[in-house]
Image (tube, rainbow, N blue to C red):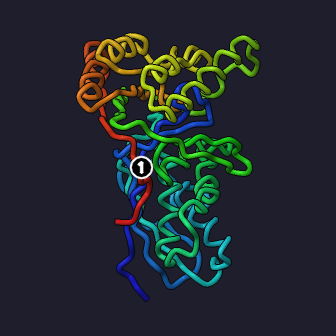
Amino acid sequence: MNRAGIKVFAPASIGNVGIGFDLMGIALTHPGDEIIARLAASPGVRITAIKGAKGQLPFEAVRNTAGKAALSLLQYLGKDKEIGIELELHKKMPFGSGLGSSAASAVAGAMAVNELLQRPLEKRDLLRFALAGETIASGSPHADNVAPSLLGGIILVRDHQSLDFVRLPVPPGLFLAVVYPHISIRTQEARAILKREIPLSLHTRQAGNLAAFVAALYRGDLELLARSLDDQLIEPQRAQLIPHFYEAKRAALQAGALGCSISGSGPSIFALCPNSLIAEQAAHAMQTIFTEAKIQSDSYCSRVNMQGAFKY
């Protein structure tokens, strides 16, 4: 039995991208989660170590996003009664940040099993198993984080049940500035405050922005992209959960960002930028707002990650 094992990395992601609630996501180059997987003597999936989680994650595979994804794939392959797999989960990104932490773990879990078993499935076919893991944390099956974390790029999910998705083009030079203020927002709380009904006029404006954003990506039109990244549906409802959100957003735009909004359920804030210099300036400007408010924060500047999850 090969006990050396393999190591897999799955990146963080920006969910929603403002105007694409539960539909669109972007993969970052960092931060992310790592999983080390090894074959074991006893069948099934066991989590032997969790590092960087401060005791907040369960070791039981069926209750852990990485473990559930791994087990779902093993069961699909019909190997759960004959093959044993041990997982070490290394959390290298913050919990509850709005950066797809649970999705990254789920993606890493599914991919680790696939790699350990010599890739019985194509990478894109792992999405359904990663989504099974992510659903434990999110409470509902939506792939706007798991799809980009697995496959990289900017992903538009047309339908979550059939996992019908489109990988959108990325204009050259596009960078992201992300700031994570150290405040706690539970995904369930952020979803609970959302209105279940919206005016038709608001839906029309939001649909127009999403359609124009996609068109801007295909055309490489950054001016249209900037006009389109205007979330009039979710951002106004969730901004109240993030102290100084609008000040940070104004600071990013004044630094030259194309657009700025809430990453996933928050509290992280992302800004799309035309180059790395403006991304650095936008990140610094946003972080300064939180520093002056005596709120600690972390910042990340990243290209759009075109690779997604990978084995080291």
Q: Quadrant of the C terminus?
A: bottom left
Spot occupied by residue 172 in the image (x, y as percentages of width and height): 36, 38
Which residue corresponds to mark 1? 306
Up the image or down, 55 lies above or below 237; here it is: below
Residue furthest front as drawn:
219
Spot occupied by residue 54 in the image (x, y as percentages of width and height): 38, 47
Helix, strand or loop at label 1? It is loop
Up the image or down, 127 lies above or below 181; here it is: below
157 or 45: nearer the viewer: 157
Spot occupied by residue 209 in the image (x, y as percentages of width and height): 59, 21
Is 9 on the left-hand or right-hand side of 164?
left
Q: Residue at x 34, y 40 (%)?
A: 303
Give amino acid for label 1.
Met
Q: Residue at x 72, y 11 (%)?
A: 201
225 or 67: nearer the viewer: 225
Residue furthest bottom as drawn:
1
Figure quadrant of residue 45: bottom right
Q: Residue at x 52, y 58 (%)?
A: 66
Figure quadrant of residue 180: top left
Spot occupied by residue 123 in the image (x, y as percentages of width and height): 53, 63
> How crowded is the residue under tag 1: few (<14 C-alpha within 10 Å), some, or many (20+)?
some
Q: Residue at x 45, y 38 (%)?
A: 99
